[in-house]
Every structure is written in structure tokens, then in C-alpha cells.
Amino acid sequence: MRKRGRTETFRITGARQGLADDVRGRQRRYVISMGIRTISVVLTVVLWNVERYVALGTLALGLLLPYIAVVIANAGRENAPSLPGTFIPTPSRPALPSGPDGAEESAGGNGRADQQGGQD
């Protein structure tokens, strides 16, 4: 059964990304950043006696990346202000007389029926 009088219209393009997709994306970013951290720690060990300055840089990266990865992973859902609004207002229509007495349905009408006293 269809309800009459329901005039709300919603755009699907304004819908946010699903929660499962959002969590999956954050997990993927965390795993990638932890993989980069692992590579930087291994490079630190390999390069310690060869290139000390590069090894110190990879050590700093290996120390800072866990903090950055956790902050990014726990940032939560992002707002998307560039998307259009999710609600489309229904265009207004002129009011129609409701019955034989000439009273109108809404105050937005021109009041013509009230001026004529309900007679045509």
C-alpha cells in the first residue's frame, strides 16, 4: 500500500559510504602504513653500518609512523561537504478549493474563493 501525502524525496548520491566499507578502508590504510614501517625498520638495520644518515632517517620514520597510522585509522568517518544535499524540497503547487464552501486548503492561495463567498 502506498501512503498519499508523503512528499519527501531523497537523493541516493548524497548517501554516505557504508560503515563496513569505511572500516575496511581504514584497516587497509593502517596495514599499508605498518608495512612501510616494517620496511623502514629493516632498512635501518641493513643500512646502519653503510649509510648512517639514511639509517637514522628510516629509524625516525619507523618510530613516528605507528603514531601517525593510529591517528589516521581512528579519525572516524569523514564528512563530504562537496556532495549535494540529501533532501530535495517538493515544489509548491497552487492551493485548490477543498469543498463547496470555497475554503482553501492552505493559506498560500490567492483568497479568490473567500472574496466570492463560495459561489461561482
Image: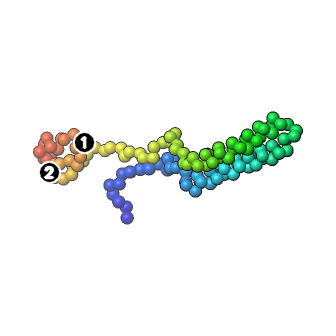
* CB atoms of marks 1 and 2 within 8 Å: no
- Amino acid identity at mark 2: Asp
Question: Tag 2: Cα neighbours inside 10 Å, few (<14), some, or many (≥20)?
Answer: few
The local secondary structure at tag 2 comes to loop
Q: Residue at x 13, y 42 (%)?
A: 116
Please give left or right for residue 26 compared with residue 60 in the image: left
Percent x, y for residue 119?
13, 47
- Amino acid identity at mark 1: Gly
- Return the residue found at the far right: 50
Q: How many marks?
A: 2
Marker disc for residue 60: none
Residue with the mark numbered 2: 101
Q: Residue at x 70, y 47 (%)?
A: 33
Q: Which of the 4 image quarters holds residue 115?
A: top left
Please give left or right for residue 78 compared with residue 88 in the image: right
Colour setup of the view: rainbow
Residue with the mark numbered 1: 108
Q: Which of the 4 image quarters holds residue 47?
A: top right
Can residue 29 be seen here?
no
Query: Depth check: 89 or 103 in front?
Result: 89
The local secondary structure at tag 1 comes to loop
